[in-house]
Image (cartoon, rainbow, N blue to C red):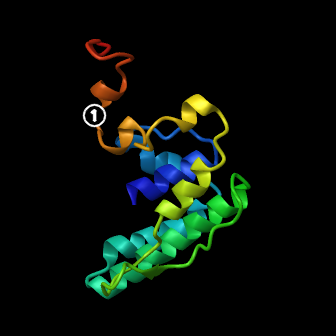
Amino acid sequence: MRDLMRVCLLLERRYAPYTKWLGSAFSRLPVAESLAPVLRGVLAATDHPSREAHLCDAYEAVAALQNASGLTSAVDPRRRPYHSRPFLVLRAERFAQALARTVTDPDLRALPLLGSVDQWADSTDLLQRARAGDRPAP
């Protein structure tokens, strides 16, 4: 859910603050009115099928938001099976690949698709450092 909210902020070209303020920033987005109840449904779900259904509804809503952004040609936003397993997912790599295909700068295209540091670290001290070895601001 955190990542979905961050993607929504990114697509709306809004700053995604650290976790403490993420929900407040997300709640100000136009999509929050329709997506927030779906996300609450994910949290309230007491069984796997219900949680999966709410998550897939959220995935599809955010996928439609990316399609509407015009950043790429449209990608099918519907949920699909996860290989032969009995789980439904978005297969979000399709959206990342569509975005990567729009990058024209050769230096950027040569970089590996790793994502940003805040996808794997949630430490404010770390994220505020400009370079390795810098001390966090007091």
Quadrant of the rendered image containing residue 98: bottom right
Quadrant of the rendered image containing residue 134: top left
Taking the spot 47% from the left edge, 73% from the top edge, the residue there is 38
Q: Is residue 44 above or below residue 137?
A: below
Q: Is residue 35 visible?
A: yes
Amino acid type at image mark 1: Ser
Taking the spot 47% from the left edge, 81% from the top edge, the residue there is 80
Q: Is residue 28 visible?
A: no
Looking at the rendering, in which quadrant would you find the C terminus?
top left
Quadrant of the rendered image containing residue 78: bottom right
- On the image, the x and y values in percent for residue 40 come to 41, 70
- On the image, the x and y values in percent for residue 50 come to 35, 85
Looking at the rendering, in which quadrant would you find the N terminus?
bottom left
Q: Which residue is mark 1?
A: 123
- On the image, the x and y values in percent for residue 58 come to 49, 70
Q: Is residue 121 left or right of residue 73?
A: left
Q: Nearer the viewer, residue 36 or 51?
A: 51
Q: Is residue 84 above or below residue 63?
A: below
Q: Nearer the viewer, residue 126 or 106?
A: 106
Q: Nearer the viewer, residue 46 or 6?
A: 6
Label 1: how many Cα within 10 Å (few below 14, some 14–19, many 20+) = few
- On the image, the x and y values in percent for residue 55 come to 42, 73
Q: Is residue 98 left or right of residue 125?
A: right
Q: Is residue 101 left or right of residue 129?
A: right
Of helix, strand and loop, which one carries label 1? loop
Q: Is residue 76 above or below residue 28?
A: below
Taking the spot 28% from the left edge, 25% from the top edge, the residue there is 125
Taking the spot 47% from the left edge, 61% from the top edge, the residue there is 93
Count all numbered tags in the image, as a single digit: 1
